[in-house]
């Protein structure tokens, strides 16, 4: 099973997270299937590659709670309505 989760990178006390598609059995910083964006919690800045996120979600990837909340902000309303209705 594939999940969309955050992968920590950056230095001490200055963490930045990548949004990645990763196998459930891998660790937090394990081998990922694709980089989908990043999230900087200190600047509250995100970048998401929406077509890549939709590609993995259409194929059954499950977003974690944090990635779900981050992607809700970035994906446009029409896409979000269609996407999250399919996930239910």
Image (spheres, helix red, strand yellow):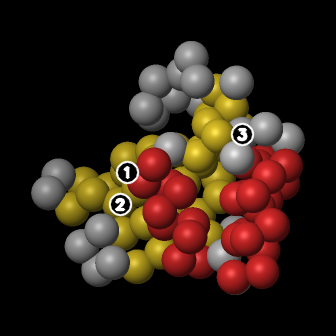
Q: Name the residue: 80% across, 52% down.
A: 86
Q: Earlier in the sequence, mark 2 or mark 3?
A: 2
For this view, does 38 lie left or right of residue 11?
Answer: right
Q: What residue does disc 3 label?
A: 61
Res 22 → quadrant = top right
- The residue pinned by badge 1 equals 9
- What is the residue that sits farthest to the left in this orientation? 13
Is any atom of residue 34 visible in this view? Answer: no
Query: Could you say where residue 28 lies in the image, as x and y percent from the top left?
Result: 43, 32
In this view, the mark in front (3 or 1): 3
Judging from the image, what secondary structure is the residue with disc 3 in? loop
Q: CA distance from mark 3 to mark 1?
A: 22 Å
Q: How many numbered discs, if any?
A: 3
Q: Position of residue 1 (x, y in %)?
A: 70, 24
Local crowd size for mark 2, using a 10 Å CA cut-off: few (<14), some (14–19), many (≥20): some
> Relative to residue 18, is residue 37 drawn left or right?
right
Category of crowding for the residue at label 3, using alpha-carbon neighbours closer than 10 angstroms: few (below 14), some (14–19), many (at least 20): many
Q: Are marks 1 and 2 in contact (CB under 8 Å)?
A: yes
**Image point 68% across, 32% down: which residue?**
2
Residue 57 in sight from this viewpoint: yes
- Sequence-first disc among 3 and 1: 1
Q: Dot 2 lies on which element?
A: strand
Secondary structure of residue under mark 1: strand
Q: Which residue is mark 2?
A: 16
Q: Is residue 4 above or below residue 22?
A: below
**In the image shown, does 87 or 15 lie closer to the viewer?**
87
**Disc 1 packing (10 Å; few <14; some 14–19; many ≥20):** few
On residue 79, the disc is none
Is tag 1's residue or tag 2's residue first in the polypeptide sequence? 1
The x and y percentages for residue 19 are 54, 54
């Amino acid at each position: 099973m594939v999940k969309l989760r955050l992968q920590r990178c950056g230095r001490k006390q200055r963490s930045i997270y990548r949004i990645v598609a990763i196998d459930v059995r891998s660790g937090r910083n394990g081998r990922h299937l694709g980089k989908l964006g990043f999230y900087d919690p200190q600047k509250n800045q995100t970048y998401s590659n929406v077509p890549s996120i939709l590609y993995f979600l259409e194929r059954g990837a499950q977003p974690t709670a944090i990635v779900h909340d981050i992607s809700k902000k970035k994906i446009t309303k029409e896409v979000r309505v269609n996407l999250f209705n399919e996930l239910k």
